[in-house]
Image (spheres, helix red, strand yellow):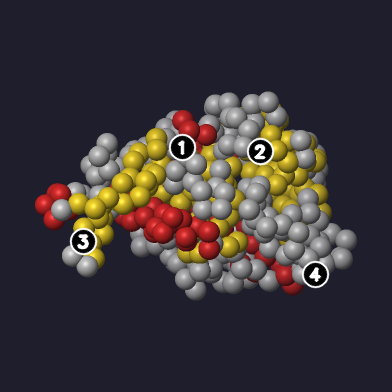
């Protein structure tokens, strides 16, 4: 467990996000940092309303994070891996139906986008996946898709996960983050060898338009509502249920041997350093191959122990899962990494390589802390705030 300090802004260029911090105090327990997100139902409904207003306009206007193409460089091999304990796994749950196909691969229902607002007020997103937990309410993504590495304040605000997202559509609802779990070294020192996060989310929420009501009903209603021009409206929201019940949850594996096949998923969107833009970010893509058998280092980010995968995707793909033992029939596997950085190994100004932190026992400790957190509902049966 190394402790390093990465100067503010240095890691953001190729991997990170510029974002608004959320008021709250992080708590650390050994290797695990626990950070509050939307801590009340009223705040959670406000966050969901922000993204769903005007038929999902904010979702449609969001883009992948900003980045500097000059920071995409060649990564270097730094020797083998030494697991810090015995190999371990947690099995996935659910059998997902196909949401489409890419290269004859059935895409899992568990993948989607996390949305938030950056420090300049722009709407941004990363890739992510639902992952198995005791309350079926957990999301796995990159640490820099959760934590504000630029300002070093706290967590990103207005954070939500939308599985199966497509052009403003939220087929299984929006899931507002309640509590984030990151490694202490990432939260405190911005150590990108620990660039992963697990977020407990509330039950999903869906809005079905607005209903005009009289002033008495408007006053009684405790859910999201709007009033203007002497007219009163309540937003017709409903509980979409638990994330894992709706889309399933991928398993997780740690201290596994490297050099084994994985399938990585995500939503690439940015252009390559040479300006060529081959992805729109609208639909998820995937890569398949063996991870590197040796540790991968990125000196400009002070990364010492990542694993690598040959994959010609672009930013927007970051945060997406690397799934080992992926079943094309069940559309389930084991998260054994998340996309963190992008590299150009042959020097032609085109990304041809992605990297992930190596999932070890310390990763398992962060996951195990997150998987036992209960979140619950946001809205009651009549669209009111659930108490």
Whether label 4 touches label 3, CB < 8 Å: no
Q: Tell which tag, 2 or 1, sits nearer the viewer.
A: 2
User: Viewed as shown, does residue 103 lie left or right of 107?
Assistant: right
Quick one: quadrant of the C terminus? top left
Identify the secondary structure beneath mark 4. loop
Query: Which residue is identified by label 1?
Result: 243
Identify the secondary structure beneath mark 1. helix
Query: Which residue is identified by label 2?
Result: 100
Image quarter of residue 227: bottom left
Q: Tell which tag, 4 or 3, sits nearer the viewer.
A: 3
Query: Which residue is identified by label 4?
Result: 274
What residue sits 47% from the left and 60% below the top? 57
Looking at the image, the residue that sits furthest to the left is 216
Image coordinates of residue 38 in percent, x first then y, are 36, 53
Mark identifier at residue 231: 3
**Does residue 189 appear in this view?**
no
In terms of sequence position, does the residue under pointer 3 or pointer 2 come before the other?
2
């Amino acid at each position: 467990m190394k402790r390093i300090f990465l100067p503010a802004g240095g890691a953001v260029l190729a991997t990170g996000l510029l974002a608004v911090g959320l008021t709250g105090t992080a708590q650390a327990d050994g290797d695990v940092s626990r950070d509050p997100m939307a801590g009340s139902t009223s705040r959670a409904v406000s966050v969901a309303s922000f993204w769903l207003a005007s038929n999902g306009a904010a979702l449609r206007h969001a883009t992948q994070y900003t980045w500097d193409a000059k920071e995409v460089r060649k990564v270097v091999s730094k020797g083998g891996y030494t697991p810090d304990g015995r190999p371990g796994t947690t099995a996935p749950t659910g059998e997902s139906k196909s949401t489409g196909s890419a290269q004859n691969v059935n895409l899992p229902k568990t993948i989607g986008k996390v949305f938030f607002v950056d420090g300049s007020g722009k709407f941004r997103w990363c890739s992510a996946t639902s992952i198995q937990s005791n309350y079926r309410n957990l999301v796995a993504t990159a640490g820099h898709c959760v934590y504000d590495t630029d300002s070093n304040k706290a967590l990103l605000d207005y954070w939500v996960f939308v599985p199966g997202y497509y052009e403003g559509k939220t087929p299984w609802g929006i899931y507002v983050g309640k509590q984030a779990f990151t490694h202490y070294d990432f939260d405190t020192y911005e150590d990108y060898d620990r660039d992963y996060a697990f977020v407990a989310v509330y039950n999903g929420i869906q809005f079905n338009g607005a209903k005009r009501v009289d002033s008495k009903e408007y006053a009684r209603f405790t859910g999201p509502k709007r009033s203007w021009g002497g007219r009163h409206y309540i937003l017709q929201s409903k509980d979409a249920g638990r994330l894992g019940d709706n889309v399933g949850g991928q398993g997780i594996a740690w201290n596994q041997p490297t050099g084994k096949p994985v399938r990585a998923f995500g939503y690439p969107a940015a252009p390559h350093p040479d300006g060529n833009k081959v992805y729109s970010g609208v639909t998820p893509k995937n890569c398949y191959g063996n991870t590197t058998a040796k540790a991968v280092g990125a000196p400009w980010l002070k990364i010492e122990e990542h694993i690598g995968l040959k994959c010609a995707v672009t930013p927007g793909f970051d945060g997406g899962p690397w799934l080992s033992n992926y079943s094309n029939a069940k559309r389930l596997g084991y998260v054994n990494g998340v996309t963190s950085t992008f590299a150009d190994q042959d020097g032609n100004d085109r990304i041809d390589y992605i990297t992930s932190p190596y999932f070890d026992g310390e990763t398992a400790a962060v996951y195990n802390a997150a998987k036992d957190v209960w979140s619950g509902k946001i809205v009651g049966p009549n669209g009111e705030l659930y108490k």
